[in-house]
């Protein structure tokens, strides 16, 4: 049997609801990630600088209540 998009669609439609999450987690690994947006790159760089300066709040210092 040759794998085709139509066969994959048919197989996905046959999956029970309890298996959808597992199937999704497997399939998503085959989708190429989009390049980050410039503002995402800037936010990451900003967070890295804050971390280097020690301008972070520790998990134990957060009032989770």
Image (cartoon, rainbow, N blue to C red):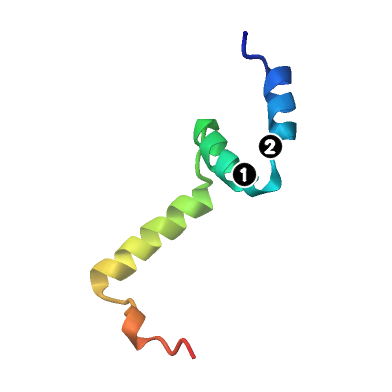
- In this rendering, the answer to whether 5 lies above or below 58 is above
Which residue is tagged 1? 19
- In this rendering, the answer to whether 27 lies above or below 65 is above
Which of the 4 image quarters holds residue 23?
A: top right
Which label is found at residue 15?
2
Which residue is located at x 33 percent, y 84 percent?
Answer: 60
Contact (CB < 8 A) between labels 2 and 1? yes
Which residue is located at x 62 percent, y 8 percent?
Answer: 1
Which label is found at residue 31?
none
Answer whether residue 54 is visible to the viewer in this image: yes
Which residue is located at x 70 percent, y 19 percent?
Answer: 7
- In this rendering, the answer to whether 54 lies above or below 63 is above
Label 2 to label 1: alpha-carbon separation: 6 Å
Answer whether residue 34 is visible to the viewer in this image: no
Foreground residue among 55 and 26: 26
Q: Secondary structure at mark 1?
A: helix
Which of the 4 image quarters holds residue 61?
A: bottom left
Q: Secondary structure at mark 2?
A: loop
Foreground residue among 5 and 31: 5
Which residue is located at x 32 percent, y 61 percent?
Answer: 48
């Amino acid at each position: 049997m040759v794998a085709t998009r139509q066969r994959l669609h048919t197989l996905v439609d046959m999956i029970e609801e309890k298996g959808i999450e597992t199937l999704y987690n497997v399939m998503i690994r085959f989708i190429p990630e989009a390049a980050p947006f410039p503002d995402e790159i800037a936010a990451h760089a900003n967070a890295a600088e804050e971390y280097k300066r020690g301008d972070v709040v520790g998990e134990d210092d957060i009032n989770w209540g």
